Image (cartoon, helix red, strand yellow):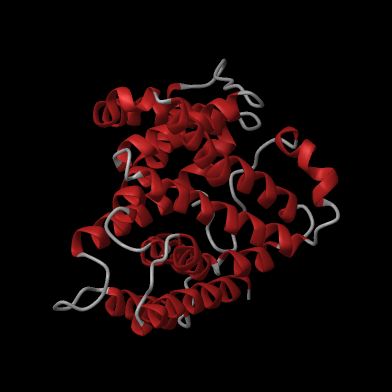
Amino acid sequence: MTAESLPGAEPYRMRPSPIRALRAASDAIPPSGLVLLGILSVQVGAGLAKNLFAELSPSAVVFLRIATSAVMLLAVARPKVRGLSRRDLAVGVAFGLSLGLMNLSFYEALARMPIGIAVAIEFIGPLTLAVVSSRRRLDLLWVGLAAAGVILLAPWGDAGTASWVGIGFAALAGTCWAAYIVLSAATGARFPGASGLSFAMIVSTIVVAPIGIGSGGSELLRPELLLLGAGVGLLSSFIPYSLELEALRRMPKRVFGILMSLEPAAAALVGLLVLHEVLQVREWAAIGCVVIASIGATRAGDG
């Protein structure tokens, strides 16, 4: 999952330098294609992470993802904290905490339910933020539609492939995603360039390290797992960030937000094709409710 952007809102703005190597190739791809490739990259990264759960705990996989993402980001954007106030640093720390907790809770949800369901429930967080920000009566329809989706996903009796614990973790991830969006904007206004994001990545790595290292132990030193963890970080963060920024350079944010609303459906398809997670008809209907609600909220927010 990219962290990472609200439907219809621009993700955390990084300097152009991380995407210079990709820009020449991406110019030949339409911006809508770049967004879809970014979505696919995020969800394949999540699928790769879930496959790692057979070897490592979810928290250990999160540590590998965040640590490798931090290393990649630090290679192109070092934190610049000189001259910042304590309040500025506190905002950066809060941004890092939201990033770490979002990933921890999402991966815990991923360990307990199909990826499509986890992403659909998590998506309620940024969707709710979009609705609250627009304050239109029509948005009540989108809230109700998204709520209907969650109700359809709930494991009433023995039905469904989700669990209440998994739903709780996914909902927490969605809440952290909404906080991430708000704190991303606040951090970007206080830190120069992309240094706020790299600072937050360091904070997130420090926060997650005790849990991830404690659960992963010496297994984290296995070369093949380190390589797979780096792949998760590359697919889940670095590549989609770069593709999204290049797409936003060439397309309206409204169109970007509508395309990003397809993420729950893309996650369900990746779950089916990569992880062989077969969903029930009502679960596909629930994911459809969330997607339609997100598209509606995005269009209303621009109206």
Residue sitting at the far left: 157
Q: Residue at x 46, y 43 (%)?
A: 183
Q: Is residue 135 left or right of residue 13?
A: left
Quadrant in the rendering for residue 256: bottom right
- The percent coordinates of residue 246 (x first, y second) are 74, 49
- The percent coordinates of residue 6 (x first, y second) are 52, 58
- The percent coordinates of residue 123 (x first, y second) are 43, 63
Q: Is residue 99 left or right of residue 105?
A: right
Above-or-below relation of 245 to 67 = below
Residue 91 seen in this snapshot: no
Q: Residue at x 45, y 60 (%)?
A: 126
Residue situated in front as seen by the camera: 73 or 78: 73
Quadrant in the rendering for residue 100: top left
- The percent coordinates of residue 278 (x first, y second) are 38, 73
Q: Residue at x 59, y 63 (%)?
A: 8
Residue situated in front as seen by the camera: 193 or 42: 42
Residue sitting at the far top: 82
Above-or-below relation of 118 to 299 = above
Residue 188 seen in this snapshot: yes
Q: Quadrant of the C terminus?
A: bottom right
Residue situated in front as seen by the camera: 188 or 229: 229
Q: Residue at x 26, y 67 (%)?
A: 162
Q: Is residue 279 left or right of residue 138?
A: left
For the image, the number of numbered tags is 0
Above-or-below relation of 79 to 131 = above
Quadrant in the rendering for residue 122: bottom left
